[in-house]
Image: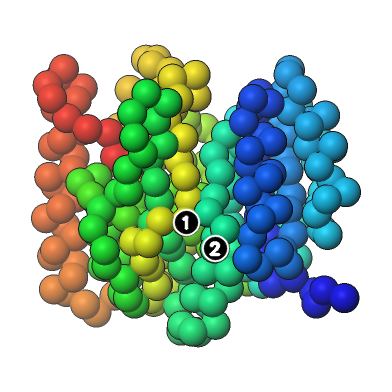
Amino acid sequence: MLKEPLLTIIMPVYNTADYLAHAFEALLRQDEPNFKLIVVDDGSTDDSAAIAQKYAQQFPYFKLVQKSNGGPSEARNVGMKYVDTPYFTFHDGDDWVSHGYTAYFLRAFKEHPECDLVSCGYWLDYSNKPEKVVGHFESGEINRAEAYLKMTNVFGSPIKGYSWNKAFKTEVVRKYKLKFDRDISLLEDQIFSVKYMSHCEKMYYTQHPYYHYRQRQGSIIHQPSIKKVKDNFLGNYRVWNRIIKSLLASENSKSERTVRKLSESTLIRSNNEGKGKRGRTIL
């Protein structure tokens, strides 16, 4: 008989029927199978909900929540309402994970009890070229300022601001009433990660890849729009506003100066994007 799970996976789903079976099959092959899976169908118009229901009996703990379409942030917020385990993570419906994914998060929290956030590395999966691992090998415990730097570094950081390569403590989210911003279509996961980290002292991470981030043109992130340009500016403002306020409240002035300097270069990069110059969106 399985013990009460310690980890919940929240999977927001919207019209990813072509990829869901792969995602579920990978989760069924986990080295540590004792986890809860919450699938939030965000008003899909394809067979996503039916496919999820088909797999329900194959998992020891499975819940399907169906709702009208409200976007990824709302779907994640809904999923968090149902979490009753000490830890939770996120998993997009069109991605998949390696067999050590769940075991890694549980092991990392056990071996690093002072850390309130855990992060793993990831693969970029392409349909027309070989997959690749982001960054170079590194791992260890880092403080809040160092975590901010890695969450906002677009050039090779294995952490970044994504929510799907991180595991969070439920008690931190409940205590500070943390939610994803619903009024923005870019950087909402980075905003959440930074808000969460602002209430923590340390995190543990590894560049070892456990998550496969599928690169597909039909995904929401790859659909250009004027709103996304505006949201890029707004998202960067919210990220750095939280970071600077957090560090001003701390006593580590050296770390504060480091992040201030990086924030200035990041805002300059965002301004250049708005003027049509070369630049990269922070993800």
Q: Amino acid at mark 1?
A: Tyr
- Above or below, 90 relative to 206: above
Residue at 66% x, 55% y is: 29
Question: Callout 2 environment at 10 Å: few (<14), some (14 to 19), or many (20+)?
Answer: some
Local packing at callout 1 (Cα closer than 10 Å; few below 14, some 14-19, many 20+) is: many
**Could one spot residue 269 in this view of the protein?**
yes
Q: What's the coloring here? A: rainbow
The quadrant the N terminus occupies is bottom right
Visible residue check, residue 241: no
Establish if 178 lies above or below 91: below
Sooner in the amino-acid sequence: mark 1 or mark 2: 2
Amino acid type, residue under disc 2 in the picture: Gly
Q: Position of residue 151 (x, y in %)?
A: 32, 55
Under circle 1, the secondary element is: strand
Residue 217 percent across, percent down from the top left: 44, 20
In the picture of the structure, the residue carrying the numbered disc 1 is: 210
Q: Is residue 253 left or right of residue 71?
A: left
Residue 271 placed where, x, y %? 17, 29
Q: Please tell me which residue is depicted at 56% across the width and 44% down the height of the picture.
A: 96
Q: Quadrant of the C terminus?
A: top left
CB atoms at circles 1 and 2 under 8 Å apart?
Answer: yes
Percent from the top left, x then y, of residue 25? 68, 45
Q: Is residue 2 left or right of residue 182?
A: right
- Residue at image position (27%, 33%) is 281
Would residue 28 be found to the left or right of residue 201 on screen?
right
Identify the residue position indicated by label 2 in the image: 100
Q: Is residue 197 above or below residue 2?
A: above
Which SS class for mark 2?
A: loop
Which residue is located at x 41 percent, y 56 percent? 209
Number of numbered discs visible in the structure rendering? 2
Q: Quadrant of residue 253?
A: bottom left
Q: CA distance from mark 1 to mark 2?
A: 7 Å
